[in-house]
Amino acid sequence: MNAVEASNITKRFGQTVALNDVRITVADGETHALVGRNGAGKSTLVSMLTGLNRPDSGQITFRGEPAPSLSDRQAWRTKVACVYQKSTIIPTLTVAENLFINRQSLDGGPVISWSRLRRTAGDLLSEYGVDVDPNADAAALTVEQRQLVEIARALSFGAKFIILDEPTAQLDGPAIERLFERMRSLRAAGVTFLFISHHLQEIFEICQTVTVFRDARHILTSPVADLSKDQLVESMTGEAVGLGAGPSRPTPAPESILDIQGLSLDKHFSGIDLSVRKGEVVGIAGSGSSGKVELGEVIVGLRKADTGTVAVSGKALKPGSVPAALAGGVGFVPEDRHKEGFVPGMSIAENATFPITRRLGRFGAVSGRRRAEVAEQMIGDLAIKTSGPEQDVADLSGGNQQKVVMARALSGDPALLVLMDPTAGVDVKSKENLLDAVDRAAAAGAAVLVISDELDDLRPCDRVLVMFHGSVAGEFPAGWTDNELVSVIEGIGESSGE
Amino acid sequence: MSDVSAPVVAARPRLQVAKLRDLALLPAIVVLLVVGFIASPIFLTGGNLLNVVQQQSELGLVVLGEALVLIVGKMDLSLESTLGFAPALAMVLVLPTSEHGLGLGLPQWTALPVCLLAGVLIGAINAFLVLRLQLSGFIITLGMLITIRGVQQGLTVGQSLASPNMPSLYYLGSAVWFGVNASIWIFLLLFVIAIVFMGYFRHGRSLYAIGGNEAAAKAAGIRSTRVTAIVLILASVLAALAGAMMVGHYGSVTASQGSGWIFNAFAAAVLGGVSLNGGKGTLFGAMCGVLMLGLVQNILTLAHVNVYWIGAINGAIIIGALVLARLTSGKAQD
């Protein structure tokens, strides 16, 4: 029996063909991966499978029965549930109410019994081993807890087929491991998953079958065991790519660009010393609680350190000041591109040239022509897929938005480039473009700090420092193996102090 | 291998701050009662306190409507104009031309239904503009505020309207039920009904869901557009009802009835913990906010503060109270 079978699905939005005669079959009880680059049609398929959108042609069946009509939300919810990237939790309500939203009275009666609602919510959460207080405000949940609550809610409707849309994108290593453990035990209990992720390693770890979409078409469906990582990447991009090649840049110059001494911040990290030389690429790895992102934010002035100094090219930066950092020759990609990375509603050209507007004209005026020239150059360098420099950044795909953020960081020809999770939520091809840009910047003499726990980001680094609970727990020259790095990130390696 | 059996750390509620927030005004009200007692011996008498509630009953209905609109994540500034327009329209349709009416000769009993229907109509226009045409609620209801006020002035030629022979419109604001003014009963009754509805009924909870995360509410099967439209209409009807109560209370509709009330309505709601971003706050809190503003007014009057300064002092006290509410809740205000 198949949990879901979709065949000959076609969907157009105006001129764009979002899905072109695709198919997918998810067998009961398996964990099925759906992969593809940004824009391959994954999200459109998910909206069809969850009844938010109707295909122009083709049909969908759940366990042999045709899909319910779009208006019958109740019927859809007993068949399939989706944990979207965007939260469907209402932050102002409690966890208990979120679990039973729009069915709070439980037995269909008119009046809500809050004590009973809380009790039932508590039972539901403990049934699935989710240790969250049902009385807590949902706003206080971490991403991990939110996902678990959403999964528990989905299961409580009786759905045995769950779609997880990039669930790991916002989780750190141990949380991903816990999620996978839970997926395995739910699978053993008969739950079917459709798992969407950009992290190919995860596909090999958790999935049995994989389906690849490319350019709105179905490319292949195959047991995961029969594929190599390179074959998978190849089918996603349509070309052979070589991610993970070691650094091929000139050796770094002896002069140091970034000098950090005795840097400490509250409970995030303490006593960090670090220097990065001209042309050197240094990676900083660590889990979500290691303090690595906070370190990056102190360096670029988004946060103010309690003690210690940051100097760039020999000059100390004023603490906690982004303008001072930019003036001192720092360019950076912030952790959350939606929050600090770009201004939606403004064009690529404007977003990418914010730090250098003063160079684009005299007396505070900005020359549109010169800005467009600079932006054209950047679009070419980073292979940004766009209709032109005047396009609104909000209309770009995630990978291309991240390239715009990278372009902004590079726009001032920075002496020091600080990149925080530069390839988060970005497809394989865009990742390659971004990492190429890092390589070029380093070859041109910039000192680069890559802060990430994505191994592909760290591979091109000359050396990688691993942070654990706020201090440096290990240092690896290029050529490390995944296992030794990950074990120190997780705090179980030999070089860890604990 | 990391230890996957380690449980996810639970989010323990920090002393239920959100719940306490709804009661946060009770101590302030107690303080005001003490201050009032010191300021004037008349203050703490049953007659005076009932007087305060009656004075606030009309604002109270506007706050009730505005709080519902805010919880569902919208805004309606036009309520203050509806307060004057709805009863004024009812009166011009009934009154002869000699009393500034249009001379249409509608029977007098139609005055109250017409007044409430005017509320339905204005609410429906607001809902159409905000929900169907997707205009920003703030600016469009500000436009409605000015337009409706202008229509009232046009219809009445700027005159106050009064009529001794219109019991239908005058009844609610002047009647006494069981020894207490009807407007006080209406105020309390409507708040109690609304508090129970919002606390214990699925449809009431759906307002919080829509204001908190509309997409999620839709995904849960809530008809968010319909619910929001009903709330906008209901708020306007409440404002129209408050307008009718004012007519009975003060004996006439002035051309500026309700002018400037929207600040007090928002202030009462926000003081009571209702968020301008939607999805947060309780009607009990909003009711406390209304009563608190009434006590402040009353104390200023009893303390013989110079009438020309009452506006400034009243405004400053409200601003101070908002600052205090912000500091005690510890979070940036939204």
Image (spheres, coloured by chain):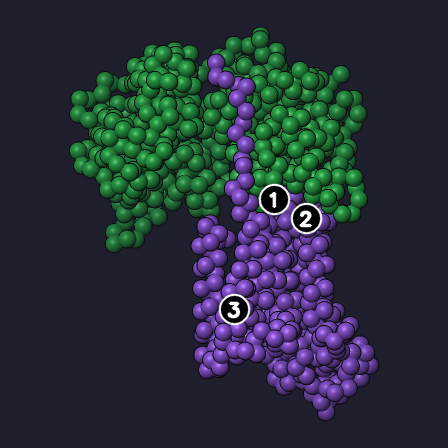
Chain colours: A green, B purple
Q: Quadrant of residue B254?
A: bottom right
Residue A438 locus on image (x, y percent)? 33, 26
Q: Residue A472: x, y in percent?
A: 31, 22
Residue at image x 65%, y 25%? A128
Q: Mark on residue A93?
A: 1
Name the quadrant of the N terminus of chain A: top right
Which residue matches tag 2?
B205
Q: Amino acid at mark 2?
A: Arg
Q: Chain of mark 2?
A: B
Q: Is residue A116 left or right of residue A323?
A: right
Whether the residues at callouts 2 and 3 have beta carbons within 8 Å, the answer is no
The disc at residue A328 is: none
Which residue lies at the image location 47% right of the left edge and 26% below the top edge? Answer: A172
Q: Is residue B8 toward the left or the right of residue B189 in the image?
A: left
Residue with the mark numbered 3 = B34
Q: State the separation of the CA atoms marked 2 and 1.
A: 9 Å
Q: Is residue B88 above or below residue A229?
A: below
The one nearer the camera, B334 or A64, is B334
Q: Chain of mark 3?
A: B
Are the residues flagged by discs 2 and 1 in contact, CB closer than 8 Å? yes
Residue in view at x 62 percent, y 62 percent? B287
Q: Is residue A32 above or below residue B69?
A: above
Give, as a three-letter code, the residue at label 3.
Val
Q: Are marks 3 and 1 on the same chain?
A: no
Subunit bearing disc 1: A
Q: Judging from the image, what secondary structure is the residue with disc 2 in? A: helix
Front position in the image: B119 or B174: B174
For label 1, the SS is: loop
Sequence-first disc among 2 and 3: 3
- Please tell me whether mark 3 or mark 1 is closer to you in this view: 3
Residue type highlighted by circle 1: Leu
